[in-house]
Image: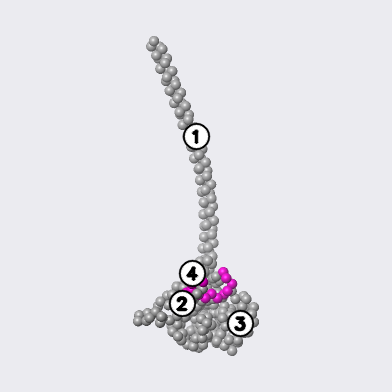
Amino acid sequence: MAILPLHEDILPMSEDYVLKSVLTHPEAKPALMDLISTFIHRKVTDVEIRNNELHSITTEEKNVRLDLNCVIDDGSQVDVEMQGSRLAGLDGGRKMLVNKSVYYLTDLHSSQKSKGVEYDELVRTYQITFSIQNIFEHNEYISEASLRTEDGTQISNQINLTIIELGKLDDVLNKPVDEMTPIEMWSTFLRYSGDRSKRDIINKVLEKKGEIGMAGSLLASISQDDRMRAINMSQRKWQTDHDSNRLFYERELKIAKEELIDIKEELAENMVIISNKDTELAKKDAELADSKAELAEKDALIAKMQAQIANQENV
């Protein structure tokens, strides 16, 4: 039975490298099979991890994608990913995470060998994405999708996408652990394992479900590893610097936009002034033209009178 010490810091499973470190551990196979079984809604009796290496996370390497690429007993492909950091720009972040999940899902599905294989022999592919950032506007924290018509009729179950929004678990936390479903217990563990204030409920989850308890034991052990704690510190520093830089540039962009608005308003005012000046100038030009025409008429009249006088003198 795993119990996470209340007084010790536990690394959060909501970080991608922690999730991968725990679930790729040689002793974690039952836990990984149970997690996959829970979220694809069928019993998994075997799993093989294809990419079990763990990159050393540094500031320069943070963009490396840490996921779990697995093959289960019937040959189906399953990719498990944790989006632990918040994506910049809420609307843009939502679109980016969904599009990224769809991209990796379809890329993984099309990567299987097709030469000499009938299309109906291709295996199914699952993308399971956990996110601490809320993605959709609906209240449900699990969104599942496959190829369906507009009325919901399934066309194909070959590609399957599941997104679990770990930021929407408030109602789940209010339930007694005995009433939680396996999905709710796994989601709670993944979101709050590193939160001391939720340690009591996490320990109850570990006691209730043995596979999560196994993952909790490995997490407690890994959390004391100096290298893992150094990675955690490095990632937190990277994330803090990243967020700080993002906020700085967002603030600078906001100031620049406000200055641009002021410049546009000033330009519009100047354009009105110029337009009024042009109107006034055009009016004066018209008055000048009228004066010139009047002067020309007077000159013509004078010339005519001078000619008449000259004719009278000649007579």
Q: Residues within 10 Å of mark 3 (few under 14, many from 20)?
A: some
Q: Earlier in the sequence, mark 3 or mark 1?
A: 3
Distance, label 2 to label 3, CA atoms, is 31 Å
Q: Earlier in the sequence, mark 2 or mark 3?
A: 2
Q: Residues within 10 Å of mark 4 (few under 14, many from 20)?
A: some
Judging by the rendered image, the residue that carries numbered circle 4 is 96
Relative side of 121 to 212, left or right: left
Seen at 51% across and 84% down, the residue is 42
Given the image, on which type of amino acid does mark 4 rest?
Met
Q: Position of residue 209 (x, y in %)?
A: 58, 86
Q: Earlier in the sequence, mark 4 or mark 2?
A: 4
Q: Earlier in the sequence, mark 1 or mark 4?
A: 4
Judging by the rendered image, the residue that carries numbered circle 2 is 156
Q: Position of residue 120 (x, y in %)?
A: 41, 80
Do the CB atoms of the residues marked 4 and 2 lie less than 8 Å apart? Answer: no
Closer to the eye: label 3 or 1: 3
Secondary element under disc 1, as helix, strand or loop, is helix
Judging by the rendered image, the residue that carries numbered circle 3 is 180
Closer to the eye: label 2 or 3: 2
From where the camera sits, is residue 136 visible? Answer: yes
Per the rendered image, the range of residues in magenta is 137-151
Distance, label 1 to label 2, CA atoms, is 78 Å
Secondary element under disc 4, as helix, strand or loop, is helix
Judging by the rendered image, the residue that carries numbered circle 1 is 284
